[in-house]
Image (cartoon, helix red, strand yellow):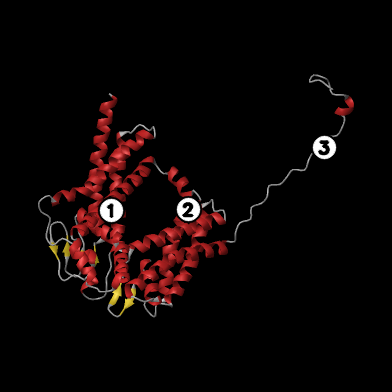
Amino acid sequence: MPTEFEPVSAEVAARPTVRLPRQRRPVRRRAPLALAATVTTVWAALVSYLPVVALVGLVTGHLQISGGTGAWLLAHGTPLSTGAGRVALVPLGVSVLAAWRVGRAGVHTGRAIGARSPGRALLAGLAVAVVYAGLGALAATLTRGLVTPVRAGLTLGGFALVCAGLGALAGGRVLRRVAKRLPPVVRDALRTGTVAAFLILGAGAATAGVAVAVSGGQASATLASYHTGVAGQVGLTLLCLVYAPNLATWSAAYLIGPGFAVGVHTAVSAGHVNLGALPAVPVLAGLPDSAVSGLGPLLLGVPMAGGMVAGALLVRRRLRAGTPPGWAALLGAAVLAGPVAGALLGLAAWASAGPLGSGRLAVIGPVGWEVAAVGAGVVAVGALIATAGTRVLIGARES
């Protein structure tokens, strides 16, 4: 038996080397774009469509395909033409569900075709948008004239293009690569402004929830006055829940300052309340009937507190990342966070408002640009104060 150090014989060395054939890696076949977009988009539409039809059936007491389909289209921002006038008050609860599912359709379609570049990701989003637009036009034919197919197709197509496009870009990690190329000040401003906006909207939701809970007796009496039975009351409760994001946004507008309207020539703000006859909706029992007094003005400091929390988190996030928090970068990000938060709050206010017919309820909700302007200033001041204060405290501890 040859040892480890025994030389190889000349005969063995002269033998030709036998090379095994290189095994090819199996080629992963991608799904066709049209098939992937159709399957994912139809499923996304059904997930948001069927609950809306069921909810309308609970409220009315019988299945209404036309009314349920119209409500589903309304959730995408498509106004309805009714006998009472134009209805465009979007149920944001359904809108959020639809946006989430369409965004996931963009993610799955992008993965199915291997979308790793911006072009491929946008192509996946465009394919989802085309299918969703077709579904919208088809759904409009079931509403018996509430919506025209062209209007529904264009609206749902634009809705899906934004949501599915962002989903495909995020699923392909394109957004992450783009974010890394942004200047650090811009990244910090976007993150800080977004955090502040969500904190203010969360405070608005909490305030609205407390107001409705305090007026629970009146809200229960309003609900019982419908005499719709258990199923009908469950449906009305769920209807109030799908409009809960609208109420949270209105409450945030109230805290920020501009307030909102619940009808023509009405106003609900911290300094002035002018309400007329209100529709018999249980959640409206929580509306204030006078200007703030007592400890009420303390609530108006909540939006600034949201900006301050976001500013403090900015400094601490920089420290956890190991980046020395310089004054110029921190203060610049805090100031720019104001317009970012203002834009998000204004967009939410604009989406939460809309008419309910051509009568007295033709004006409902806050004015988007007013909320955006005031919110931007409040958040910028709060973030600037907290960022500077946190930086000073950290510097004092280090010294």
Quadrant assignment, res 305: top left
Quadrant assignment, res 252: bottom left
Label 1: element kind: helix
Q: Amino acid at mark 3?
A: Val
Label 3: element kind: loop
Residue 258 in view here:
no
Q: Residue furthest right?
A: 11
Q: Position of residue 57 (x, y in %)?
A: 36, 73
Residue at 53% from the left image edge and 65% from the top image edge: 38
Disc ID at residue 169: 2
Nearer the observer: mark 3 or 2; the answer is 3
Q: Between 244 and 328, which is closer to the camera in this rendering?
A: 244
In the image, residue 376 sits, relative to residue 385, either above or below, namely: below
Disc ID at residue 18: 3
Residue at 21% from the left image edge and 48% from the top image edge: 302
Q: Between 146 and 161, which is closer to the camera in this rendering?
A: 146
The CA distance from mark 3 to mark 2 is 48 Å
Q: What is the quadrant of the N terminus in the image?
A: top right
Quadrant assignment, res 320: top left
Q: Which residue is mark 1?
A: 201
Q: Amino acid at mark 1?
A: Leu
Indicate which disc, 2 or 1, sits on the residue closer to the N terminus: 2
The CA distance from mark 2 to mark 1 is 26 Å
